[in-house]
Image (cartoon, rainbow, N blue to C red):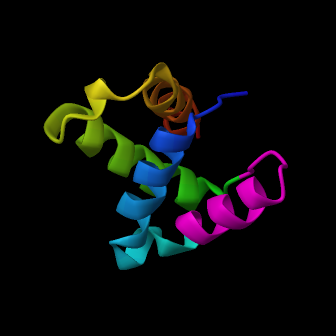
Amino acid sequence: MVELNDREADELLLRLQQTPSTRAAAETISVLANAGTSVTLTNLEKTAVFEVLQAWLERDGGETMGRGATSLRDALAIDVAQP
């Protein structure tokens, strides 16, 4: 399980909400996180979140955040690579 700190979670949700293709993932994460339960994403949502995290961490300075964003990206990379 990967945990994001509040700052990372807020930033990730903001980035996911900005693009129509990632809004469904943002809604899933937001609802489940507010309920205090684990988040399970569809394969399509995993790919979308992975792509947002990848861009954030490589281009947009996400490396200044906690380790959670990097851990989530790495975990999703494994899931996305599996058939």
Q: Is residue 77 above or below residue 24?
A: above
Q: Which residues are magenta?
A: 25-40
Look at the magenta stretch and give its main secondary structure: helix
Q: Position of residue 24 (x, y in %)?
A: 56, 73
Q: Report the quarter where the N terminus lies.
A: top right
Q: Report the quarter where the C terminus lies.
A: top right
Residue at point 56% right, 34% down? 5
Q: Position of residue 60 (x, y in %)?
A: 18, 42
Residue at point 83% right, 59% down? 35
Q: Position of residue 62 (x, y in %)?
A: 28, 34
Give the left or right position of residue 56, taking residue 71 as reference: left
Q: Is residue 31 above or below residue 57?
A: below
Closest to the observer, 12 or 52: 12
**Labels in figure, total:** 0
Residue at point 48% right, 25% down? 74
Residue sticking out furthest to the front: 6
Residue sticking out furthest to the bottom: 20
Residue at point 56% right, 42% down? 6
Closest to the observer, 76 or 31: 31
Give the left or right position of residue 37, taking residue 49 as reference: right
Q: Is residue 33 magenta?
A: yes
Q: Position of residue 64 (x, y in %)?
A: 28, 26
